């Protein structure tokens, strides 16, 4: 079974991200049946400080206990869905910080995006796409862009329009297809790590 981590990118008090991520998880699990295992990953549960590793993750695994726990959690997934708001045209600092902690754990895996904001977090997702490319992730095309004006009541009560259900289904279908196609690449990387 393909394991997908749905990463809640906001840690802000009063955030909408947990409700959006739960909606994505429910739709994905219902749509994919027994093919995918969708799990919420809440950055608030990991309490990662601002990056405090002396050596960049691309050169060596982190040594801090919180980095090791984070690496183990992220490394266990075959694919990811980033659920992100947009703050001043960018994703939350907590999300980019969490991504920067790791390198090998992200590689050879597909990533999809569900954004929410005044304009659907399109600019924040563009920045995440650039970051994913550097990390050797397969950045898939479909994106769900939720509008604070049209998919939330008073910018707070999440009530997504029905059209987004089909968008999530398309996103999940493509994400699962990419995860399966990239399976040999992930296997080769794990084998190389164990023989190094």
Image (tube, helix red, strand yellow):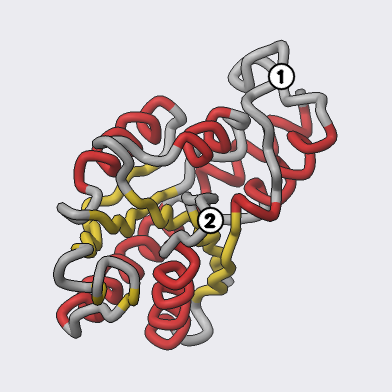
**Lower sequence index among marks 2 and 1:** 2
Tell me if residue 116 comes above or below residue 126 in the rendering.
below
Quadrant of the image containing the C terminus: top right
Q: Which residue is mark 2?
A: 13
| Callout 1: SS | loop
Marks 2,1: beta carbons within 8 A: no
On the image, the x and y values in percent for residue 20 come to 40, 69
> Which tag is nearer the camera, tag 2 or tag 1?
2
Tell me: 98 left or right of 173: right
Tell me if residue 190 comes above or below residue 111 in the rendering.
above
**Quadrant housing residue 127:** top left
Tell me: 171 left or right of 35: left
Q: Closest to the observer: 16 or 176?
A: 16
| Callout 2: SS | loop
Q: Residue at x 69, y 12 (%)?
A: 55
Q: Is residue 157 visible?
A: yes
Q: Residue at x 40, y 73 (%)?
A: 24
Residue 53 is marked as 1
**Quadrant housing residue 157:** bottom left
Report, in whole angstroms, how far the alpha carbon at label 2 lies from the one at label 1.
Answer: 27 Å
Task: Specify few, some or many for label 2: CA neighbours under 10 Å numbering under 14, 14-19, or 20 or more.
Answer: few
Q: Closest to the observer: 28 or 84?
A: 84
**Quadrant housing residue 40:** bottom right
Tell me if residue 155 comes above or below residue 186 in the rendering.
below
Q: Closest to the observer: 36 or 7?
A: 7
Q: Closest to the observer: 134 or 35?
A: 134
On the image, the x and y values in percent for residue 96 come to 47, 34
């Amino acid at each position: 079974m393909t394991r997908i981590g749905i990463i809640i990118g906001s840690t802000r008090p009063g955030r909408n991200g947990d409700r959006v991520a739960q909606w994505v998880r429910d739709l994905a699990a219902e749509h994919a049946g027994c093919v995918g295992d969708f799990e919420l990953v809440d950055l608030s549960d990991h309490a990662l400080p601002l990056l405090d590793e002396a050596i960049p993750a691309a050169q060596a695994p982190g040594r801090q206990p919180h980095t090791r726990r984070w690496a183990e959690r992220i490394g266990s997934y075959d694919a990811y869905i980033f659920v992100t708001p947009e703050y001043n045209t960018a994703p939350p600092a907590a999300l980019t910080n969490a991504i920067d902690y790791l390198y090998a754990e992200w590689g050879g895996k597909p990533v999809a995006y569900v954004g929410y904001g005044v304009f659907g977090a399109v600019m924040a997702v563009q920045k995440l796409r650039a970051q994913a490319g550097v990390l050797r992730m397969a950045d898939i095309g479909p994106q769900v862009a939720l509008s604070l004006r049209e998919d939330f009541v008073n910018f707070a009560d999440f009530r997504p329009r029905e059209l987004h259900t089909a968008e999530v289904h398309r996103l999940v279908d493509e994400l699962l297809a990419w995860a399966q196609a990239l399976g040999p690449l992930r296997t080769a990387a794990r084998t190389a790590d164990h023989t190094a």
